[in-house]
Image (cartoon, coloured by chain):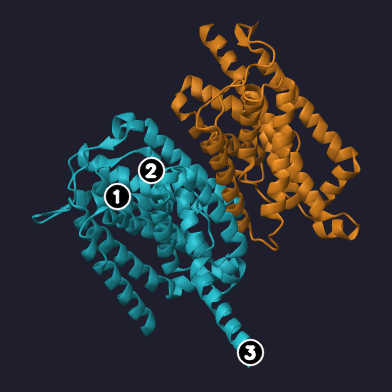
Amino acid sequence: MKSDRIKFLVFALVVLLIPLPLSGGYLTNVLIFVGINSVLALGLNLLLGYAGQISLGQAAFFGLGAYGSGVLTTAYGLNPWLAMVVVALCVAAFAFAIGFPVLRLKGHYLAMATLGVGIIVNIAFNETVDLTGGPSGLSGIPNLQIGGLTFDSDLKNYYLVWVFALGMILLSLNLVNSRFGRGLRAIHDSEVAARVMGVNARLMKVQVFTLSAFMSAIMGSLYCHVMTFISPNSFGFHFSVELLTMIVIGGLGSVYGSILGALLLTLLPEMLRSFQDFDIIVYGLLLITMTIYLPGGLVEGIPALFRRLVPARKVAEGSDA
Amino acid sequence: MELLNQVTQFVISGLATGSIYALIGLSFAIIFNSTGIINFAQGEFVMLGGVLAIFSLNVLHLPLVVAIAVAVAVTTIIGLVFERLAIRPLKNATPLMLIIITIGASILIRGLVMLLWGKDTQALPAFSGTDPISIAGATLLPQHLWIFGVTVLVIVGCRLFFNHTISGKAMRACSFNRRAANLVGISVGRMVLFSFVISAAVGSLAGVIIAPLTMTAYDVGVMLGLKGFCAAIMGGMGSGLGTVLGGLILGTLESLGAGLISSGYKDAIAFFILLLILFIRPQGLFKKGETERV
């Protein structure tokens, strides 16, 4: 427990110090998205990696957060912070309501149902032109403000996003080590056994679904204020799959795995920029090869590889002598 | 009268796209029944059928019939390779892993097609002209007839295959009980491979025959695949009449909804139906609940 706390403190320190030498350049901008994607991936990981319930519509909750905040602040002039709270609560309530019928389904059927929800929401973003601007997007969203401080530079936004992200990461770390987290893992291993042991599996699945939607919605609100422009393309099926790829690469059922996956998959397209559309192929290949050869993701794979290499060298030395 | 004509028109075009959904649904069911896998890359096989046919026709300058044959053959081979490379290496895979792998395959195929042939939407020429035939105040395109004809042929063909050939019976045996099938000497692995091959062939054929009617491009597979899945769910994942009816109902409802309510929400209607069915009757519209008596 104590080492976990130290780990988190070191991580937080690194996160807070990183932008100092960068002083707000292009890389800082990329790292803002690492923060946002980390929390989105983490939300999905709580659901999929811990409770074993797949969702292919995660981008929808992110989109609802972004559009909710965007519309409330531009069209109705609501205070952005108030809008964020209202929207996050509404999205959570929505997730809670659809969670009961959706999470009764299992495996492939659950995947298809969440995918269906995601696509319907995305179509709604495109079709409600009066409200959302339709396919051409919604622009002119104000930056967030606190006191006299306006979050209008990359550096300020970096700290804004990461303070939220660190809070949610800490929350998740505590959550997965709690009674609730153990319940989730029990459901993952065997729902029937978990029920027999007195875990209210159905309610718990809906709760974690709601929590992941809530986290995604908050990040959606932040995203819209950071970008000041949003369009339906950012919240489609493709992004849901990207989030899935992040946690598969990082490691299912690992908080830091989500962050690692988000970091890699957010940097990757930037590095592959010169190859343009190659990134989609890379996602596909990564998903297949990681699932077949490294189902534990990198957070398990790297230590395992290390362990395999180290004794191997010892054996080699032994044979020399 | 005007409205009636319109409705007839919507129903006709709805039944045509519905036939396509039925074929795709069938291709889902073939794999599901012998393996228990829902192949999320199924829509990509459909897309490949259309895209490869256009490529063979326009770039390789093959005659239409040969182009279609090439498209179906190449997609079938891709189905075979897919099973060998992505499905077979997995031993004791959980449904979760299978979902992730087939999704990975689907974006891989989509990405490769996009790189090789670009993002343009293209259409295949109609198989036998575009002179409309008018029926009861509505018009029927010759391509509609092709779609109905091919759908009927494929469904009858599948039925004969599964009920009257040794391989077909063996595949059905696998779907009932893999272990028992193995015990009586059926190679389950080979049957799984077969099911992917047949499924890719049926899916690509659906993609080819719809390509003249609706344009095709690298990204049409997602929607077509999902709607085919919806049809299969309506039919209770059986490979028979239920899926066909499911596809036809879905196509008609979608076409009526698009025509009478709003075309923008066309796809949303299909997913709304999918969700309703998953919530209310996940065993399918036409199946009685599983009853087991000792």
Q: Please report the residue visible at 55 percent of the width from the left and 55 percent of the height from the top.
A: A287
Colour chosen for chain A: cyan
Circle 1 SS class: helix
Asked if disc 2 and disc 1 are in contact, CB closer than 8 Å, the reply is: yes
Instruction: Give the residue at mark 1.
Output: A223
- Which amino acid type is marked by label 3? Asp
Q: Is residue A222 left or right of residue B109?
A: left
Circle 2 SS class: helix
**Quadrant where the image shows the N terminus of chain B:** top right
Q: Please report the residue visible at 62 percent of the width from the left and 61 percent of the height from the top.
A: A292
The one of B158 and B268 positioned closer to us in this rendering = B158
Chain identifier, colour orange: B
Classify A302 as above or below A265.
below
**Can residue B248 be seen from the camera position used here?**
no
To the question of a shared chain for discs 2 and 1, the answer is yes
Q: Chain of mark 1?
A: A
Q: Residue furthest left?
A: A148
Mark pair 2, 1: CA separation: 11 Å
